[in-house]
């Protein structure tokens, strides 16, 4: 077997290894869940030498019975919940447009929860000072409000006055989606200078994390100095703290597969920021936070600073909108499009575009596949011709092998000369496969990480394109009262994919090398088991791609 054929087989094996490894070592058929307990509280006072440090995680969180806490109700098209007037904490937030699962009575997705609940998760925007004598609003402060309801049409104005007559004003607005804007104003009516720093933090206590190693990022994330920073929970746990000195902070937050909570500080200055881990009283605690430089407010002067909190679904169009509207760098990277970002995002745009016309993402996948196939037709045609020439040249190649069997250098030289004379590229036959690999991974990523694909139905029994085919041939697709183990969950779509792959191979020219031909015969069966737990949307793409390849091959065979 000459070196070119070896390279060809190696390329195909490498391609299959990538897909195999992706499935069995990265995407587990039944993703395990692990629970983490996390909680953090800001420090109320900073020592003088800590002016440039962050708000440190405290040992305990002061909680209060919900019946005793005054709240501002949040009501918008996308959100419901409330803000605690004690400490001005965003700790009660429900996403109205999303259910936890597909069951009829499924509750809506809850993002934020108060500190005294099992799944505590909240955000704060506030002020600290290096001087203990400066009386600032803190966790025990009860703010006064001019309204009981916050909505896109009606902002809420809060105020609090300290014993020195310094007035603290906060205006909170929310848009129709998931963005809160918090403007803090300090009116220094005292006769003293006020050194203050603005801070923001997000913390969690007890969350459920889908275990999906290397498939997508979950945990602390942010854009600092226009670079994306991603740290897994384990990374921060090992390091205890990841600090970033005074720098440009576009946004920092904590991300899940489909949901993001993030802080977007005012762009008027640089900030120190921190991703924190602490273990207190047996509970794991994680926090992301930022703090501004010291601002001196002289007597009689006012000072204002504006920050934002995003808390909601990771929708591509929303991130694009906010990124442009507020100049938030790399905000769309909160959606983990992966290594093939440059391909994956355009693939999503194409799917989303056609979805706007057909109203079904499954149909949109079919349309995008047709377009990709048309764009690759010329390459496929060249590949066919090259494979045909290789097959016709096989007798001459065998003659050269017999003639120079004892001289490897001369053998390779003669074969390369033959390829050059006949204008044959020995690896052209596998080029369509190589080109499809990034497309395959891009579609996989779109299905796996975009909220738009979550619980998106197709037709028939497919209720969620991002989940695996729920049927299996081993109970006759639900006709038998038997639930097979996960490795036997081979549904209708994986079977259709394998059948169409087999038919496609039958119509394609056989590889010139007999060993390669034998390997290729087993590929449909191997792919059947490999792909059975992949998102069914990907199987729909691959099956449809095979059908189009059969039609394409028929056309090429007829006219070539």
Image (cartoon, rainbow, N blue to C red):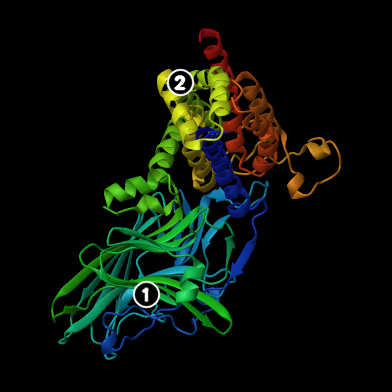
Q: Residue at x 59, y 24 (%)?
A: 512
Q: Callout 2: few (<14), some (14-19), or many (20+) C-alpha neighbours within 10 Å?
A: some
- 371 vs 527, left or right, is left
Which residue of the protein is positioned furthest toward the bottom in this rendering?
133
| Residue 227 placement (x, y as % from top left) | 31, 59
| Residue 520 placement (x, y as % from top left) | 64, 31
Q: Callout 1: few (<14), some (14-19), or many (20+) C-alpha neighbours within 10 Å?
A: many
What is the C-alpha distance between the residues marked 2 and 1?
Answer: 72 Å
Whether tag 2 and tag 1 are in contact, CB under 8 A, the answer is no
Q: Earlier in the sequence, mark 2 or mark 1?
A: 1
Residue marked by disc 1: 143
Residue marked by disc 2: 382
All told, the count of numbered labels is: 2
Q: Residue at x 18, y 84 (%)?
A: 190
327 in relation to 408, above or below:
below
439 in relation to 34, above or below:
above
- Labels 2, 1: front one: 2
Q: Residue at x 85, y 44 (%)?
A: 482
Which residue of the protein is positioned furthest toward the right in this rendering?
481
Specify the quadrant of the image occupied by residue 170.
bottom left
- 370 vs 17, left or right, is left
Is residue 5 something one can see in this rendering? yes
Label 2: state its secondary structure. helix
Is residue 107 something one can see in this rendering? no
């Amino acid at each position: 077997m000459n070196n070119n054929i070896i390279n060809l087989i190696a390329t195909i094996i490498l391609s299959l290894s990538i897909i195999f490894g992706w499935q069995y070592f990265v995407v587990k058929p039944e993703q395990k869940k692990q629970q983490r307990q996390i909680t953090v509280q800001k420090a109320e006072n900073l020592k003088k030498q800590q002016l440039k440090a962050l708000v440190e995680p405290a040992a305990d969180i002061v909680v209060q019975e919900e019946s005793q806490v005054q709240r501002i109700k949040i009501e918008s098209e996308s959100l419901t919940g409330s803000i605690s007037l004690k400490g001005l904490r965003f700790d009660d937030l429900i996403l109205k447009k999303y259910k936890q699962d597909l069951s009829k009575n499924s509750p809506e997705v809850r993002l934020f929860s108060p500190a005294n609940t099992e799944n505590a998760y909240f955000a704060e925007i506030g002020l600290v000072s290096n001087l203990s004598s400066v009386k600032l609003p803190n966790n025990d402060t009860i703010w006064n409000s001019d309204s009981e309801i916050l909505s896109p049409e009606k902002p809420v104005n809060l105020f609090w006055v300290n014993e020195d007559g310094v007035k603290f004003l906060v205006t909170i607005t929310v848009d129709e989606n998931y963005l809160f804007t918090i403007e803090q104003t300090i009116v220094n009516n005292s006769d003293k200078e006020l050194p203050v720093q603005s801070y923001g933090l997000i913390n969690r206590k007890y969350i459920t994390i889908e275990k999906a190693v290397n498939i997508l990022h979950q945990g602390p994330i942010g854009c600092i100095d226009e670079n994306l920073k991603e740290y897994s929970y384990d990374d921060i746990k090992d390091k205890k703290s990841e600090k970033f000195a005074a720098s440009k902070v576009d946004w920092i937050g904590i991300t899940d597969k489909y949901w993001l909570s993030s802080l977007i500080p005012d762009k008027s200055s640089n900030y120190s920021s921190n991703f924190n881990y602490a273990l207190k009283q047996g509970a794991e605690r994680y926090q992301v936070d930022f703090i501004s430089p010291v601002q001196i407010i002289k007597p009689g002067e006012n000072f204002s600073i504006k920050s934002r909190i995003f808390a909601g679904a990771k929708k591509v169009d929303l991130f694009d909108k906010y990124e442009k509207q507020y100049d938030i760098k790399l905000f769309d990277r909160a959606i983990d499009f992966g290594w093939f970002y440059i391909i994956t995002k355009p693939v999503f745009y194409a799917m989303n575009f056609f979805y706007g016309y057909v109203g079904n993402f499954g149909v949109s996948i079919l349309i995008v596949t047709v377009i990709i196939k048309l764009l690759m037709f010329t390459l496929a045609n060249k590949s066919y011709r090259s494979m045909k020439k290789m097959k016709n040249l096989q007798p001459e190649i065998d003659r050269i092998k017999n003639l120079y069997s004892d001289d490897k250098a001369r053998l390779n030289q003669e074969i390369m000369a033959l390829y050059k004379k006949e204008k044959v590229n020995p690896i052209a036959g596998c080029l369509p496969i190589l080109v499809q690999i990034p497309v395959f991974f891009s579609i996989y990523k779109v299905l796996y990480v975009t909220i738009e694909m979550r619980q998106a139905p197709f037709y028939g029994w497919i209720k969620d394109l991002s989940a695996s085919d729920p049927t299996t041939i081993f109970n006759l697709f639900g006709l038998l009262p038997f639930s097979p183990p996960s490795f036997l969950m081979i549904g209708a779509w994986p079977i259709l994919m394998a059948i169409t792959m087999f038919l496609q191979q039958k119509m394609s020219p056989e590889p010139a090398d007999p060993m390669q031909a034998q390997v290729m015969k087993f590929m449909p069966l191997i792919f059947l088991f490999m792909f059975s737990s992949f998102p069914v949307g990907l199987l729909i793409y691959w099956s449809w791609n095979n059908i189009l390849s059969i039609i394409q091959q028929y056309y090429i065979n007829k006219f070539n």
